[in-house]
Amino acid sequence: MSFIYKKKLVSHDELISAYPMSAKDILIKKERDKQIKDVLTGASDKFLVIIGPCSADNEDAVCDYVSRLAKVQEKVSDRIIIIPRIFTNKPRTTGEGYKGIAHQPDPEREPDLQEGLMAMRKMHLRAIAETGLTAADEMLYLENWPYVEDLLSYVVVGARSVENQPYRLTISGMDCPAGMKNPTSGDFSVMLNSCVAAQGSHTFLYRGYEVRTSGNPLTHCILRGAINKDGQYVPNYHYEDLIRLLDMHEKRNLANPAAIIDANHANSGKIYSEQPRIVREVLYSRSANPDIAKFVKGVMIESYIEPGSQNIHGRIYGKSITDACLGWKESERLIYTIAEHV
């Protein structure tokens, strides 16, 4: 057989029962969810800053980082809603390398999905309990969603998943905002088609059931840049790109027009230090055109405690073992800059 069934994993009901969300944190999340929803529907003019490590590889370092964000959030709460990136799954283009804490709770050991599911849930719970900030995570593995659906305030569908029908249909049944990234080709139509699909109602096979979804009106676009046929990075955060996406969006008649700009990945050419410059250009575009200001609801930034990256055997606390990230000092300064210009 091609599949070797190693062991049956804990069910999501069992894991949630073992690691429940406290009554206090349930109320915190409810309020956070409303605030984020209000931004995406236009009821609030606050700006979303989705920021954090490329991959949440170490619980202590990640929770330390989120606690720093919480202190900044208190100072900018009148203008900004900070959503920590706690990405527990890491997509790998070739299938090789570290796949995230949900896959490898210890990056230097073999995968252990049972321990990974527990590590994923415990990290999100701890971050909320210690900071009051509910997080974003990437839906790389749809099977993981039931294990954290009560904890997340934002989900991301990556560039390599956005064309996949099961992702679009599953997002249509989620109750939280979902950002659909443009595919690596950069095709805006593909991204917009994914939003149309996810905002609609569907009947499909899910976890052994025939289910029907109501549609997710909070599904929106994330621009992350593209890669052309020659393997070159092509940014799509410029003024002209935003105008083009806004025009295409209006023709689709989608609910709650919104876009988030990813300042790293192909937009920065994976040069992490370019992120502040890119964010500043996005802020300038918003100031230059009120339609863009209404449409661009936030930015996404890859940031950790220490700048840059290290290999998987590195021992520098709070430094990425995947894509290079902006360091804390630069990140804090950038958040205050954003607050001054939104």
Image (spheres, rainbow, N blue to C red):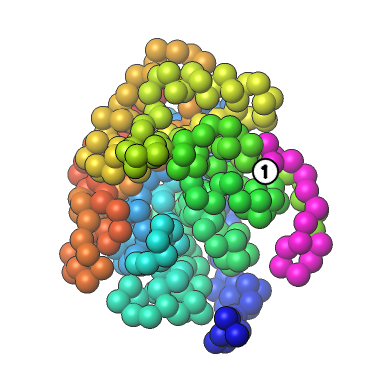
> Residue at image x 69%, y 41%?
197
Residue 159 lies left or right of residue 279; in this view the side is right
Residue 52 lies left or right of residue 211; in this view the side is left
Rate crowding at label 1 as few (under 14), some (14 to 19) or many (20 or more) other CA atoms within 10 Å: many
- Percent across and percent down for residue 340 are 32, 25
Identify whether 26 is placed above or below 45: below
Dividing the picture into quadrants, the one containing residue 281 is: top left
- Asked if residue 207 lies in the magenta stretch, the reply is yes
Identify whether 297 is placed above or below 147: above
> Residue at image x 46%, y 69%?
102
Identify whether 263 is placed above or below 16: above
Foreground residue, 226 or 207?
A: 226
Dividing the picture into quadrants, the one containing residue 82 is: top left
Amino acid type at circle 1 is Ala
Q: Which image quarter holds the C terminus? A: top left
Q: Among all residues in the image, which is located at the extreme front?
A: 230
Foreground residue, 5 or 15?
A: 5
Q: Identify residue for label 1.
A: 198
Tell me the magenta residue range: 196-210
Foreground residue, 259 or 42?
A: 259
Residue 126 lies left or right of residue 29; in this view the side is left
